[in-house]
Amino acid sequence: MGQITVVIGDRLGKGQKVGQGIETAGGKAIVIPGVAADMKLGDVMKAEGAQLGISFCGSGGAGAITAQTKYGYKAKYGMRSIDEGVTAINEGYTVLGFGFMDKEELGQRLVEAYIKKHGNP
């Protein structure tokens, strides 16, 4: 059985806590370094063959919209809660845009929801 790969792009270069949650749930987290990392989300997802991408910025949208426009990933953005993210995965979205929410629980619950819906890659 494989391992789900999740790329994290944060406008402020953060995302380490959500990455820890992803790894707790058995996934592989790739945190893009540096400011404006959210704008590189689609590029890194494509390069890594990732199943999920998480974008964080004030609006929760810029990186997700860019990934959708450039690569056709199905994106949902402007989310403000973990439950919204779980619902988005259940609806088939692969790029999730949040306001700033670098929380371990977010990463863990998103990976658990993805594996429950799709199984491990």
Image (cartoon, grey):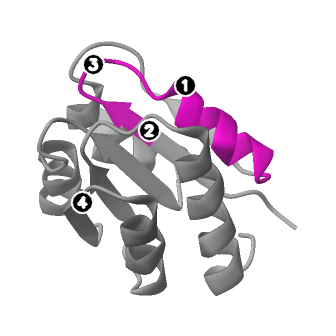
| Pointer 4 or 2: first along the chain | 2
Q: Toward which corner of the image does residue 62 lie, by quadrant? A: top left
Residue at 39%, 86% in the rendered image: 91
User: Could you give the CA–CA distance between mark 3 and mark 2, rounded to whole angstroms?
Assistant: 11 Å
Write down the residue under mark 3: 12
User: Could you give the CA–CA distance between mark 4 and mark 3, rounded to whole angstroms?
Assistant: 23 Å
Q: Toward which corner of the image does residue 35 lie, by quadrant? A: top left
User: Could you give the CA–CA distance between mark 1 and mark 4, rounded to whole angstroms?
Assistant: 25 Å
Q: Taking 60 as reference, is 103 left or right?
A: right
| Pointer 1 or 4: first along the chain | 1
Q: Which residues are magenta?
A: 8-26
Q: Where in the figure is residue 23, as x and y percent of width and height? A: 73, 42
Q: Is residue 46 above or below residue 51?
A: above
The circle on residue 44 is none
CA neighbours of label 4 inside 10 A, class few (<14), some (14 to 19), many (20+): few
Residue at 22%, 53% in the rendered image: 64
SS at badge 4: helix
| Pointer 1 or 2: first along the chain | 2
Write down the residue under mark 2: 8
Write down the residue under mark 1: 16
